[in-house]
Image: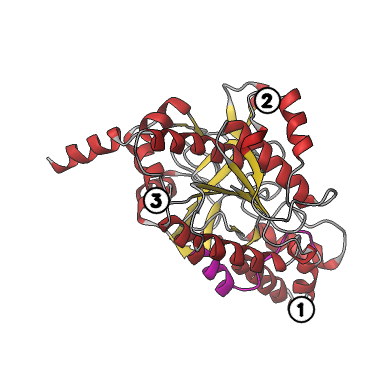
Amino acid sequence: MVWGPGTFGYSPLGLQAFRATQCPGINPSKVRFDTDHHGRFGGDNFMEGNLDTHMISAFGMNVSTLVSNTNASLSTEEGDGFGLALLDFVTGLANRAVVPHVLSLSLGSLSAYSCDLLCAEAAKTRKVSRGECEAYLQSQRQVCMFKSEAQVARINHGLMALGLRGVSVLGSSGDGGSHWSFGPFRGAGRVPSVLNEVGCAFSFPIFPSPSPYMASVGGTVWEAGDPRRPVAWEGSGGGFSWQFGRPEHQEAAVAAYLSRTAGLPPAASFNASNRAYPDMSAVAVEGTSESAPTVAGIFSLLIDARLNAGLPPLGPLGPRIYEVARAFPGEAFDDVATGNTKTSCATGFPATKGWDPATGWGRPRWPGLLEHFGSDESIRGRAAVRSR
């Protein structure tokens, strides 16, 4: 399943054209709408919906795919109406009699904490009032789309409930590195100038990708067009949540990164104790909106293999991602050790060997994923060794 509000949807004719020109293996008959909201041509979210649908169905060939839009109001497209739409969606989905095995979420913005911190620090300069900052941010497209930390916490609870129902949720890590929703604020006015200065001084994570109950997917590109030389895409989002604590399965990998990596941002600019993201990465063409549904399609195939073998779906992916990456290095994920999340700022999180906030554990490798996620044999074997 892919989801979005506002004009989100897809064009069946566009999917047929994508099949004819780029991906003949797609089966359009396996893709259908989840609600009566089928999207509206011309909106940003309609383009997003088409991209999500193309990628998840291309990489999850012949797996049934739902395209969901549960709130077609334009108030949910760019501003803080989005947060309520997402809350209603995850709550409603968790209460359905039948839930999807995989959910891909590409849309998001700076977290409520990030937006509050941005305006608080801007107000300290005495060049911009808090009210001016908040009004300006709401005038920007998909920059601050959550009303409060309490709303974010409720959405996070809904994502947890989906995990308990066996849903594997994946999300895009963002397109503004460690500092932005998309990039620096445009214009030469006083407000954007101050916000750009503050934006480079702190890490401003997005949401929902850093939720502990979601697998966060960053972006990579091919250096000099060579697929054998992956590097972090310069806009790939990554860093540390301000709101959510670090889950236990991340502890060893993240602690190792923080202890051995030179050139980290100033300690006061991020919360080194909290949830770190992304968890892995995939090819991004001008955005991680391509990365997440790509990986979601891959995991759809893995879960299909599990179901055909009489195994249960995977549910929350985080614990297994980190266990597999540590126990079987280089098998399920191809390490990407080049890049940085700084974008146009002076500091960011550098990519390095092993897990890092630029590319997570790296890009997926099908043979290792099939062995360690499509089957439980390697995990059982590892548990048996530990018990001896």
Tell me the quadrant of the picture where the C terminus can be found.
top left
Q: Is residue 55 magenta?
A: no
Q: For mark 1, what is the residue?
A: 131
Specify the farthest residue to the right: 188
Which callout, 2 or 3, points to the residue nearer the camera?
Answer: 2
Pointers 1 and 3 in contact (CB under 8 A)? no
Q: Position of residue 21 (x, y in %)?
A: 76, 23
Q: Position of residue 387 (x, y in %)?
A: 15, 43
Q: Residues within 10 Å of mark 3 (few under 14, many from 20)?
A: many
Q: Position of residue 141 (x, y in %)?
A: 78, 59
Q: What residue appears at the point 71 percent right and 71 percent down from the top-left corner?
A: 122
Q: Residues within 10 Å of mark 2 (few under 14, many from 20)?
A: some
Quick one: label 2 or label 3, which is nearer the N terminus?
A: 2
Give the CA separation, mark 1 to mark 3: 38 Å
Q: Quadrant of residue 313?
A: top left
Quick one: label 1 or label 2, which is nearer the N terminus?
A: 2
Q: For mark 2, what is the residue?
A: 23
Residue range in magenta is 140-156
Give the CA separation, mark 1 to mark 2: 49 Å
Kindly identify the amino acid type of the residue bearing the numbered disc 2.
Answer: Cys
Pointers 1 and 2 in contact (CB under 8 A)? no
Give the CA separation, mark 2 to mark 3: 36 Å
Quick one: label 1 or label 3, which is nearer the N terminus?
A: 1
Q: For mark 3, what is the residue?
A: 250
